[in-house]
Amino acid sequence: MNQTVSSPQKITGEISPPGDKSISHRAALLNSIGNGSAKISNFCEGDDRTSMINCLNSLGAQIDEGASDGEFIIRGNGLNGLIEPTDVLNAGNSGTTMRLVSGLLSAQKFYSVITGDDSLRFRPMKRIIEPLNLMGAKVSGRDNNSYAPLTFHPNNLSGIEYSMPVSSAQLKSCLLIASLYAQGEMIINQPSNSRDHTERMLQSMGSNIRTEGLQITMSSTELNCIDVQIPCDTSGSAFWLVAACCHPNAKIKINNVGMNPTRTGVIEVLKMMGANLHLTNESFQGGEPVADIIASSSKLKGIEISGEIIPRVVDELPILALASCFADGKTIIKNAEELRVKESDRIAATVDSLKKLSASIEELPDGMEINGTGALTGSKVDSHGDHRIAMTNGIAGLLADGVTTVENSEAASVSYPNFWKELTLIQKA
Ligand code: S3P
């Protein structure tokens, strides 16, 4: 599918992005192995949600749509109540599904296999296979334990002390889920902070989890199901923040955005660049901070984005690269080599797209260098089959002169099925 976008005179309106994908996935998985039942409200939308729910339901989880939109009811099976799936599980395009569900599968008393789509089968899985096997699991993967399909044979797990080689919330969460089934204490040392939704949710569900600095310690416990009201996705909001900040005549209100400090790197970076962002209605929802954000036309300046903030802004780097095209001076993004192993090689895909729109941008091995020119020219760009690149290109179309055609635009539906509709609405509001 192709979408054509051009720059409107004015951007205005109110948006409520879908429920947070990371929190939704954790709410579904952890409640499925909890005791009792839970109501999840404002569950995320899109193909990744289907992948997670299908995998869990194939394991005997009881997840049903509730009475209202975005509501799901989960009846917990308890820690040991899952059943052997009768077919290969399919995580689709969702790295979070594959890595979190793998933590679960590694500890079950049955055999299972998980695979994914053409992108996911080439994303690194050694990072989870190695530590799971150190815990005693019997996990194997294609190409010398590097990639999916992954197979799991039953074995008993023990807690270990493990220093993560990459700062990855998916890896950390995989190990925490496995350690719910392990004998003895699990200690995880993180190189830097990444999103901590798993830790927060495990804590609320009654687990023995402790975080001290970058070290997480956990031991096995039963979990109590909890209701979760999911905030709107911080990463989904980032597209609208950049649209408003970079357009000369814009003001958008984004409702109920998740403000977990391990996710708000994008807000910190935009503020450092000089963005006009105003937070209102700050409150707590389901153990997570939330706020409404009002974003408006801004005079941005180039900065360096590197170091410990990278894992807290990792999904927003393509859209921040776009923002940098409209900033005064140079922006350098460094230490972001993880971008190369996301749903696409997001360094190559971002540079390819923005170059086609006549941006002054170059690839670095671990990031990008952008010289802000204050303008882009519409052209034909491709989503590279990656939802975040599709949406970055859509926002680029709102800001570029002339017409931008986004090819394979349907990729956005992985995390934001209404993205193109909302993009049209803010031009007409
Ligand atoms: C996610 C963690 C991040 C992020 C992904 C969602 C999660 O990946 O890129 O979109 O829900 O845990 P890594 O933790 O592997 O960097």
Image: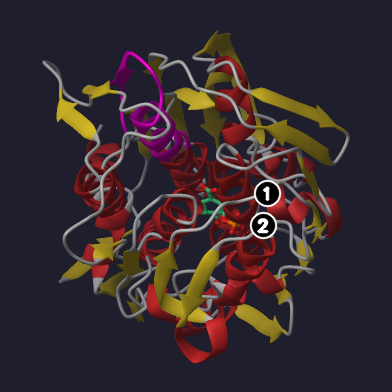
Residue contact between numbered discs 1 and 2, judged by CB atoms under 8 Å: yes
Quadrant of res 321: bottom right
Q: Is residue 40 visible?
A: yes
Element carrying mark 1: loop
**Tally of numbered discs:** 2
The reply to whether residue 373 is in sight is no
Locate residue 5, reporting x and y percent.
Answer: 27, 62
Q: Secondary structure at mark 2?
A: loop
From the viewer's perspective, is 228 left or right of 241?
left
Q: Label 2: which residue?
A: 135
Please identify the residue farthest to the right as the structure is shown.
Answer: 213
- Residue 388, labelled with which disc? none
At which x and y percent is residue 126?
60, 74
Amino acid type of the residue that numbered disc 2 sits on in the rendered structure: Met
- On the rendered structure, is 334 left or right of 287? right
Q: What's under tag 1, amino acid-wise?
A: Ser
Q: Could you tell me which residue is drawn at 75 percent across and 47 percent down?
A: 273
Quadrant location, the N terminus: bottom left
The answer to whether the beta carbon of the residue marked 1 is less than 8 Å from any atom of ligand 1 is no
Q: Residues within 10 Å of mark 1 (few under 14, many from 20)?
A: some
Rendered image coloring scheme: secondary structure
Q: Residue furthest bottom?
A: 143
- Residue 58 is a magenta residue: no
Depth check, front residue: 194 or 125: 125
Task: Determine whether 232 is above or below 316 in the image.
Answer: above
The residues colored magenta run 23-43
Q: Position of residue 242 (x, y in %)?
A: 53, 47
Q: CA distance from mark 1 to mark 2?
A: 5 Å
Label 1 belongs to which residue?
A: 158
